[in-house]
Image (spheres, rainbow, N blue to C red):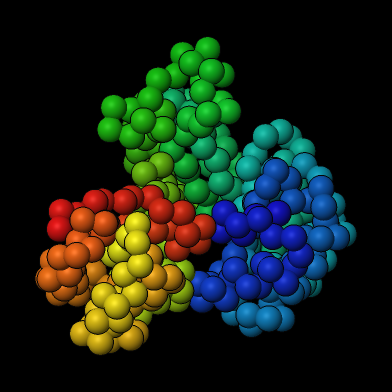
Amino acid sequence: MFANEVQVRDLDEIIKQAMLMDARGTGITGGEPLLVFSILIKIIKLLKSKLGSEHHIHLYTNGELLSRNHAILLKECGLDELRIHITSERSWKGVEIAINAGLLVGIEIPVIPNQLDYYKRLILRAESLGVKFINLNELEVSESNYMAMKLRGYDVKDDVPYAVKGSERTAVELLKWAKENTKRITIHYCPAKVKDAIQLKSRLKRIANKVAKPYEIVDEDGLLVKCVISSEGNMLPLLRLISEKVGKSKIHIVSGRYAEVSIAHLDEVIKLIKRSTDIKRKIKLYVVREHPITHLILEKIPLDI
């Protein structure tokens, strides 16, 4: 199991990841979560008990394995929303079972280009059954499905290289059609770039603001920004001097050869390094951008001293 890209080995680690970002909700996906139904129920109950009944949980499934008993248990344990990806007639049966059990049901599907009539029929059928909403996702290309997409004649957009050309046009046509031909169901469209530009970035910012040290700044992408000072020799006297000037909370001295310091004091740090002529040539200074979850350094910019 993974939570926010971090592999978790027990259920308590899921709670730790949720608390790390002050999560207001959880989306559970797979694979097919219904294949491990007992674990699924434990996770939902644990999230609700630790984070409160208002913590919103939605579950993704194709609905093919959903039984009446499953639906009742999901409702009883507090599942807020079920999102079904229609793959067969059995999926439609799952939709009916879930609605009859009192679950809030939506349909979430990728939009295949030029399949307008299929999606119109799907929307009308969903509305007639009492489905509350449909999420239309722009069709995406990944490493695992790239060749299959190419063999089917699909190409990617010039400005978003992981989004299939024509998917958005079909989705927009569907929205216009649905506005005139539906009454009770809500239709949403999610472009592929939203996942990176908004959803992922917002999640990183929430985590970064929780884990940032006093000497780290959170940038607009949700990454941790700081300066790194390294040296071939011992520079502890210099690091102590920097600490006196910028404040102990604005520098983290790892060793006599390595330290991290706030980028807000970059000019002052450079001045102090320049005054230390005997070790200046051994010192290297970088601005780094670090992932707040994995702590992988994504960018390392050397600075002239």
Residue 118 visible in the picture:
yes
Residue 214 lies, in percent from the top left, at: 35, 80
Residue at 38% of width from left, 50% of height from top? 298
- Judge left or right: residue 168 versus residue 159: right
- Judge left or right: residue 126 versus residue 161: right
Quadrant showing the C terminus: bottom left
Residue at 39% of width from left, 75% of height from top? 253
Q: Nearer the viewer, residue 244 or 110?
A: 244
Q: Nearer the viewer, residue 132 or 256?
A: 256
Residue at 26% of width from left, 51% of height from top? 301
Report which quarter residue 264 is drawn in.
Answer: bottom left
Residue 60 lies, in percent from the top left, at: 65, 51
Q: Residue furthest front?
A: 278
The answer to whether residue 39 is above or below residue 166 is: below
Residue 63 lies, in percent from the top left, at: 73, 46
Q: Nearer the viewer, residue 293 or 169?
A: 293
Q: How many marks?
A: 0
Report which quarter residue 228 is drawn in.
Answer: bottom left
The answer to whether residue 107 is above or below residue 18 is: above
Residue 74 visible in the picture:
no
Residue at 36% of width from left, 44% of height from top? 193
Quadrant showing the N terminus: bottom right
Q: Nearer the viewer, residue 105 or 55?
A: 55
Residue 177 lies, in percent from the top left, at: 38, 39
